[in-house]
Image (tube, rainbow, N blue to C red):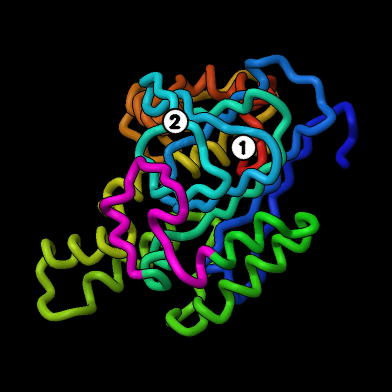
Amino acid sequence: MPDAALPRSHLHLPPLALSSCVHSTIVRDTRGTVLAPAQRLNYFPASPLCGIFWLMEGEAVVVRRDGVEVSEPSPRITFAGPHTVPMVSANPGPVHAFLLGLLPQAVQAMTGLDLATLVNRTLPLETVLQGPWLAWAEQVLHAADDAERIALVEGFLAPRWQACSEATLSRPERYRHWAEALARKAHTSGVGQSIRQAERRFKQWAGLPQRELRRLSRAEDLFFAARAPDSESGPRDWAMLALDMGYSDQSHLCREVRRVSGMSPQELDHAITHDESFWLYRLWV
């Protein structure tokens, strides 16, 4: 069991052989902790990643998507497509969850899924994937501990990714490098080299248009820059950050941050620092 006083949130990076397939695995464990209802919320930013989520203990309900109130109970094993809007889930009580973040190109290559039909959707895994994937997912759910879950993930995905991957991307945890490599491939593969054909190939592999991935990539780079150790002294200079990160001005930066997170830069920065429900942001940045 984790420390009785604190929730446990842990991010595990993949081995090199899976670095162009798996973004990370994440454990969230609030058993034995005392949290107010607001602290049992989970804020997820817009992200090009696909995800598989396991609930070993406890419950989860999606309560907000792009600022709209919803009520979508999560099954024990959930598949999440790429999201262009932020999402919030709630845990009514203590929870032990395991999250797998996957690069969309890898998901499409291994499964043949049309990711464009899964954007902004969370579904029971059995409605999306069948056969060996379901049997494996059940093994992960009932594993003895999180270390065994990570081993099961890596053992299952490694041979499948090796069979269909052409190369391992450098710095895979940063979407920009993956998106740029994918764009080059889209423009140089297949019959015909028109821009429209390349855009169709890109969206088929990633689920999102190239411009959307660039937007999300720049927002992620902004989060890293704003949270860098040398930026901790004094208030954030958002105007300078906007210039450094390629936004047209501070207003442009603010609009894009709100689209990705649902909050202004100042609100998000404060929440990441002080609000337990923004634990996922802290893990990533």
Q: Is residue 151 left or right of residue 116?
A: right
Q: Are marks 1 and 2 in contact (CB under 8 Å)?
A: no
Q: Is residue 181 left or right of residue 188?
A: right
Classify 10 Å Cα crowding around label 1: few (below 14), some (14-19), many (20 and above). some
Mark 1, residue position: 280
Which element carries disc 1, helix, strand or loop?
helix
Q: Is residue 184 above or below residue 173?
A: below
Q: Is residue 197 left or right of residue 129?
A: left
**Visible in this render: residue 251?**
yes
User: Is 171 inside the magenta-drawn segment?
Assistant: no
Residue 91 picture location, percent across and down: 62, 27
Which element carries disc 2, helix, strand or loop?
strand
Query: Residue 115 is drawn in which quadrant?
Result: bottom left
Q: Residue at horizontal 69%, vertical 50%?
A: 11
Q: Quadrant of the C terminus?
A: top right
Q: Is residue 140 above or below residue 44?
A: below
Residue 238 picture location, percent across and down: 48, 25
Residue 139 picture location, percent across and down: 65, 63
User: Which label's residue is closer to the chain start, 1 or 2?
Assistant: 2
Q: Amino acid at mark 1?
A: Leu
Q: Residue at horizontal 32%, vertical 49%?
A: 118
Classify 10 Å Cα crowding around label 2: few (below 14), some (14-19), many (20 and above). some
Mark 2, residue position: 72
Q: CA distance from mark 1 to mark 2?
A: 20 Å
The boundaries of the magenta stretch are: 112-134
User: Is 126 inside the magenta-drawn segment?
Assistant: yes
Q: Which mark is residue 54?
A: none
